[in-house]
Amino acid sequence: MTSKRTSVVQAGMGDDPAYKSVSPPIYLSSTYCYNTISQKGKYDYGRTANPNRNELSDTLAMLENGSSCVVTSSGMSAIDLVTNLFNADALFIAPHDCYAGTHRLLSHRAEQGRLKVKFIDFLNTKAVSDAFKEGPALIMLESPSNPLMRLVDISEICKLAKKAGALVAVDNTFLSPVRQRPLDLGADFSIHSTTKYLNGHSDVVGGAIISKNQEHGDQLTWWANCLGVTGSPFDSYMTLRGMRTLHSRMDNQETSAMRVAQFLHKHPKVFKVYYPGLPSDPGYNLCKKQQFGPGAMLSFEVIGGFNAAKKVIEGLKVFQLAPSLGGVESLISYPPTMTHGGISETARNDAGIKENLLRISIGLESPEDLIQDLSASFTLI
Ligand code: PLP
């Protein structure tokens, strides 16, 4: 059996029935001919299924050891999709410091009476045991969390969930399947914003949800078709194309991230670094236990509050100021007004997102250039 690394590089290659093209063709057609009025071929309508989307979903299921995968139009539609498996009285437990879009979606759905949600700090054992006493239907985890890189012990939470009869969904966006496989740790669903590391080139918005059990996968496939949230053929083609280099990109980006984290950790103008690859990080041991590496995302707090954070950003020349992550280019973002600008100040404070916090996504540039860029910018504060 070939390794996952080899399988993803070669996914769908050489299967072209028309011309034997090495790279798979794109099937943009929205519809497909029936053989007779009562007999359709493998495909009939693009919302329901498409060859490029199938190639991508098969590859993602293979990478995460899942039984099936649904490719969606965005990470948010993948997160929303899983909510359809539950009735309106189902209680969801989610991290208080989850991605702001997830927080917004769940809290607004709860306001509409479509589900119940409780946001808790998963590192607070009392909060976790209290939450389990309330009979949750779904536990949503994000590990590492955005933007503070806090790690949750996924297998411990999955054991508690199993006892309580709850399902577990893990947002695996920050690591990708090459650095963490939640289904192997006991989760029922692994969710991705494929916009990030999986596509890896900041030119597609997409999502995916991989199920451990086929029945859940079939239900999600049914809902995705019913709601019309499946990903486009072109985006699927691009994402699979990007994924062929996922292992190499992550290896390189992670090596650079470690160097940048070590530089920041020693810098006198940096108050704190959030990176589970550093022995000083509270997530260091858990990272070694449940991840295949710390990944390439990190956050840090500068000394000097908001003004210092603003000056550092304005001084950077190599890092681009943008909210996304996981691409080949290095990005910096200011969580209080960017990724987490849409949630209330109280929710932000509860999550520990301070005015001196900066988040960076390390890309494929030379690490020396990235360190030099940060170093020059720190001289401005
Ligand atoms: N989950 C996490 C952890 C994210 O960072 C994001 C987006 O930044 C999403 C989900 C939402 O994904 P998308 O923007 O593709 O809808």
Image: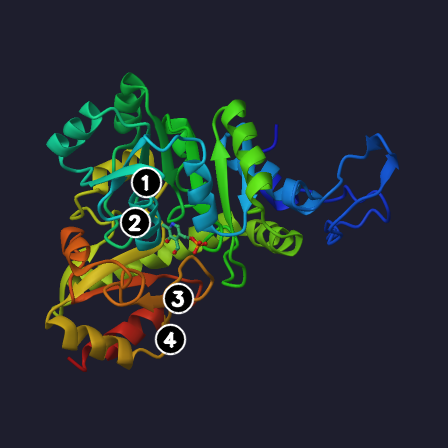
Q: Residues within 10 Å of mark 4 (few under 14, many from 20)?
A: some
Quarter of the image where the N terminus is located: top right
Position in image of residue 348 (x %, y %): 19, 57
Q: CA distance from mark 3 to mark 1?
A: 40 Å
Sequence-first disc among 4 and 1: 1
Please name the residue that numbered disc 2 is placed on: 103
Question: Are the residues flagged by discs 3 and 4 in contact, CB closer than 8 Å?
Answer: yes
Sequence-first disc among 1 and 2: 2
155 left or right of 134 in image: right
Query: 260 or 240: nearer the eye?
Result: 240
Please name the residue that numbered disc 4 is placed on: 318
Sequence-first disc among 3 and 1: 1
Amino acid at dot 1: Gly
Amino acid at dot 2: His
Res 39 quadrant in image: top right
Question: Are the residues flagged by discs 3 and 1 in contact, CB closer than 8 Å?
Answer: no
Q: Is mark 1 within 8 Å of ligand 1?
A: no
Marker disc for residue 113: 1
The local secondary structure at tag 3 comes to loop
Q: Residues within 10 Å of mark 3 (few under 14, many from 20)?
A: many
Q: CA distance from mark 2 to mark 3?
A: 26 Å
Sequence-first disc among 3 and 4: 4
Of tags 2 and 4, which is closer to the observer? 2
Sequence-first disc among 2 and 3: 2
292 left or right of 223 in image: left
Please name the residue that numbered disc 3 is placed on: 330
Quarter of the image where the C terminus is located: bottom left
Sequence-first disc among 2 and 4: 2
Query: 261 or 151: nearer the eye?
Result: 151
Residue for point 11% across, 69% down: 303
The local secondary structure at tag 4 comes to loop
Q: Is mark 3 within 8 Å of ligand 1?
A: no
